[in-house]
Amino acid sequence: MSPAACRASLCALLLLTLLTLPPWTARAAESDRLWNVTLEVADELRPLLEQHLDLFRLADRPGLDNELIEHLAARSGAEMRNLLATAGYFSPRINIDIRHEDGVPGVHLRIEPGAQAVVTAANIRIGGAIENETADAVRVTALRERWRLGPGAPFRQSSWDEAKDTLLRELLLDGYPAARISDSRAEVDADTAQVRLTVNIDSGPLFLYGETRIEGLQRYPRSLLDNLRRHHPGQRYNHEDLQRYQSALQASGFFRSVSVAVDPDPARAAAATVRVIVIENPAMKIDLGGGFSTDSGPRGELSFIRYNSFQPGWQSTTRLRADSKEQTFSSELALLPEPGDWRNRLGVEASRSDIEDLVTRRFGLIAQRSWRSPEREHDWSLKFQAEEQSLSAGPVDNLNALTLNYSWTRRNVDDLLRPRRGHMINLQLGGASAAVLSTRSFTRAYGRGLYIAPLTRRDRIHLRGEAGAVWSDAREGIPTEFLFRAGGDQSVRGYDYQSLGVRQGTAVVGGRFLGVATIEYQRDLTREWGAAVFADAGNAADTPSSLKLVQGYGVGVRWMTPAGALNLDLARGRETGQLRIHFTLGARF
């Protein structure tokens, strides 16, 4: 018998088996249920009752007899009244009917919830030491005006609890960590479906910072923590000050864990102790890493970190990184952070790259002064770079540049790892002079940005752009790092990594002008998975008039992980007609 005939016979046998199954097989799932519950209620109240009512929660539990079922049905009336009251319905009409169908007990619940109660008055009083603080008088008024459950609002227990928590939290986080709710009442008139609210808050004393007590510090100088501190004795307590201080200590790299908290004892409010508990990283650390990029293939990385180099608190990092297109060795010495979060770094770097038939060997020395936070970055750098360029089977060019550069970054998004709204911007300006250790004079400007616009809770638009320009008599003599190429995972998808630029023989070299734009539509399919449709356009060229944008477009899958979004894209280059797969982590910024 042929394979096709075998498959046809198997399908026929399966269909015959299904058609001849006894009727009780199809009803087996129904007979497993001990009793049936039907609920007749408004759709918006159904989830509340089905989730919390014992009749639903225990419907599949074995070992319950008819007597217990009737007991559950009898007490369900009180359960439903309590549940409906949390949603603001205080005078419902409830009908409970116990029936038997084919020997299976059934309970029919019919509910007319009545009118939902509304708030008719909200008496909010904020007292305590805050009344004597002239600077907080306007704030108290503003807190009352921002009360979330004002007259006319429908009353729900969840909304009532949330409004109280929000009001109290604003005091707890700014000046008054000992604040408490001394009295709260919701007076309900069930007949008229009206609720009067009363909330009294005792602010407690105003807290001012006192000494900073540090525990767990052994190898590193106390000045490391003092220089990163954002609060000073005598200043008013603010929770954000301590959160930023904790984040700065954690980001410094010296500590495995950091905890920062103020002593909440009201008796010490005039000089509240700030307690800092740290667990230090080992004096030395070796990291091994690996990865994969559709731009450059597999990647390996080895780094050695020493946290006390030459001086206590000076951090040295030596790193070796290699992939199929570029190999880099670098060493950096980061000095002790200064007050105000500025930090100085000295570094050396050597690298080799072979991309689109352009082979580049670089050696560089860099001095950098930077200020960084999760939202903003400022970087000044002075860099000397010696570079050797060669095309395939072509001559070797040697060039130098001493450049002064500035970079500014701003991030204003709802989540740094998985942004769903907001924007990111990076602007750079730099240059070199032929009079000072440079082969050619040039000025360079570059900017990139990402804007995320939510359309609905599940849909959003990503708009991304890049632009760059180098002003010089010619591009010859300018290091590759300061010129522009496009194409690849983080640029124009559908094209090879840095394959868009100035064509020189079989090689692609950097141009003096760059333009890239992206529009991408994303939709969440589940909590973890999403889909995207996108179009990219861009190119690099040596003059503005020769900058001809090429296009790529495609579809993608988004997987939300704790480390950010994993993006898998299938893109087609319009000019080449080729399909390429692109794999990236995080937002394309």
Image (tube, rainbow, N blue to C red):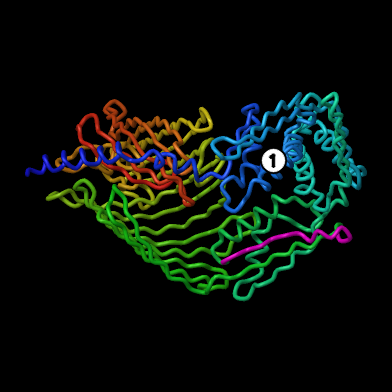
> Callout 1: 10 Å neighbours few (<14), some, many (20+)?
many
Quick check: is 267 in the magenta stretch? yes
Query: In the rendered image of this protein, does residue 565 appear above or below residue 117?
Result: below
Q: Position of residue 182 (x, y in %)?
A: 88, 47
Kindly give the residue lying farthest to the front in the view shown. 103
Q: Position of residue 555 (x, y in %)?
A: 33, 34
Q: Residue at x 85, y 40 (%)?
A: 136
Q: Quadrant of the N terminus?
A: top left
Query: In the rendered image of this protein, does residue 475 appear above or below residue 546?
Result: below
Tell me if 78 is positioned left or right of 328 in this view.
right
Residue type marked 1 = Ala
Quick check: is 67 in the magenta stretch? no
Tell me if 287 is positioned left or right of 249 in this view.
left
Q: Residue at x 49, y 43 (%)?
A: 31
Magenta-highlighted residues: 256-268
Q: Position of residue 484 (x, y in %)?
A: 32, 40
The quarter holding residue 217 reads bottom right
Disc 1 is placed on an element classified as: helix
The residue where tag 1 is placed is: 73
Q: Position of residue 449 (x, y in %)?
A: 46, 36
Count of residue discs: 1
Query: In the rendered image of this protein, does residue 411 appear above or below residue 242?
Result: above
Query: In the rendered image of this protein, does residue 348 appear above or below residue 111?
Result: below
Tell me if 221 is positioned left or right of 456 in this view.
right
Could you say which is closer to the camera, residue 66 or residue 231? 66
